[in-house]
Image (cartoon, rainbow, N blue to C red):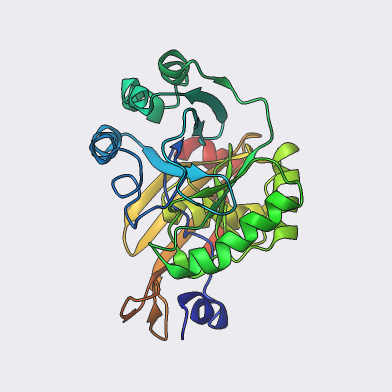
């Protein structure tokens, strides 16, 4: 039985520029089984799920459900749930946490403000505060979306949890099933594909030190996909690992070709040319889908701008 991950790995499909896009992540604990569209097909009230989808639309907030690794027997409605919000834009990266007995409280959030990076609405609505614990490692395990996420993601989440890694949660959907197991790390919002447990430990250690591990990285969710590829390319060229050092400040052009300006906190600027290509030969974008040619982000050129030219262009 073929799996979409097997073909993607065999064909060495590039990972850069494939992360889900979200300036802000909102995570709600929901134990038990998840359906393909988990907000409306889990034990969360589907009316609440639909209201949350509507509230978040167009705000830059992406909502996902999380649960602890392990068996997912249905024990009914939890009395208390963890809720997290994380903003991923460099210069204003934060992770706040709260608990609630009533998930309806989440609708009291100002989603537009949350998407713009204001944590006050989260703290006011849910009694939240800055997260003092370990960074979060979210492992996609929703087999109803794609069986690869269950077959490869759940064992990874379990291994990490059993080995004592803190901050590990299963999550409903991160996109890119064919790159399973996929992991999103918060607060910085970098996603990874085809990861193994030892790599996740290294990635989390880097987060604690404010560093980004580039190997296996799909990109930062703070940027659109061309920007993700451009930022990672600059990291490689400049040998830059500091998590908050680079920002995508301008994107010019339209598909299939963009010119992207990436800025360093020290004032340096790079111009990166990114072209959208088609992955060939055809392969499944996810298990059960027809053969196709998923889009890929190819970095055509990376050029550091002269300081004087950079000043004029800005």
Q: Is residue 143 above or below residue 253?
A: below
Q: Is residue 54 left or right of residue 201?
A: left
Residue for point 45% across, 65% down: 177
Along the line of sight, the residue nearer the viewer: 68 or 255: 68
Q: Residue 292: percent from the left, percent from the top?
A: 33, 79
Can residue 193 be seen here? The reply is no
Q: How many marks?
A: 0
Residue for point 27% across, 34% down: 48
Q: Residue 305: percent from the left, percent from the top?
A: 57, 48
Along the line of sight, the residue nearer the viewer: 16 or 169: 169
Residue for point 34% across, 58% down: 36
Residue for point 55% across, 26% down: 96
Q: Is residue 242 above or below residue 254?
A: above
Q: Is residue 118 above or below residue 15?
A: above
Q: Residue 226: percent from the left, percent from the top?
A: 43, 56
Q: In this view, does 159 lie to the left or right of 153?
A: right
Q: In this view, does 240 lie to the left or right of 253?
A: right
Can residue 34 be seen here? The reply is yes
Q: Residue 221: percent from the left, percent from the top?
A: 48, 46
């Amino acid at each position: 039985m073929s799996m979409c991950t097997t073909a993607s790995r065999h064909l060495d499909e590039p990972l850069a520029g494939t992360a889900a896009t979200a300036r802000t992540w909102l995570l709600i604990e929901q134990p038990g089984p998840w359906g393909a569209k988990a907000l409306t097909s889990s034990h969360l009230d589907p009316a609440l799920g639909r209201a949350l989808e509507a509230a978040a639309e167009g705000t830059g907030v992406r909502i996902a459900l999380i649960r602890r690794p392990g068996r997912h027997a249905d024990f009914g409605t939890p009395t208390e749930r963890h809720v997290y919000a994380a903003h991923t834009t460099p210069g204003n990266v934060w992770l706040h946490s709260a608990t609630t007995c009533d998930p309806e409280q989440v609708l009291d959030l100002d989603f537009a403000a949350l998407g713009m990076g204001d944590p006050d609405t989260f703290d006011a609505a849910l009694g939240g505060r800055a997260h003092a614990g370990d960074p979060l490692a979210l492992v996609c395990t929703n087999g109803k979306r794609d069986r690869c996420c269950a077959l490869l993601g759940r064992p990874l989440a379990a291994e990490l949890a059993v080995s004592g890694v803190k901050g590990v949660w299963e999550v409903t959907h991160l996109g890119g099933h064919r790159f399973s197991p996929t992991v999103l790390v918060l607060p910085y919002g970098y996603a990874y594909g085809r990861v193994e447990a030892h790599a996740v430990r290294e990635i989390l250690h880097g987060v604690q030190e404010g560093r980004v591990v580039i190997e296996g990285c799909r990109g930062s969710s703070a940027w659109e996909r061309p920007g993700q590829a451009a930022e990672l390319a600059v990291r490689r060229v400049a040998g830059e690992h500091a998590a908050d050092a680079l920002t995508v400040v301008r994107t010019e052009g339209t598909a299939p070709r963009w010119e992207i300006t990436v800025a360093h906190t020290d004032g340096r600027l790079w111009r990166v040319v990114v072209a959208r290509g088609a992955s060939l030969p055809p392969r499944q974008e996810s298990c059960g889908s027809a053969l196709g040619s998923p889009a890929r982000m190819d970095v055509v050129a990376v050029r550091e701008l002269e300081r004087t030219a950079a000043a004029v262009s800005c």
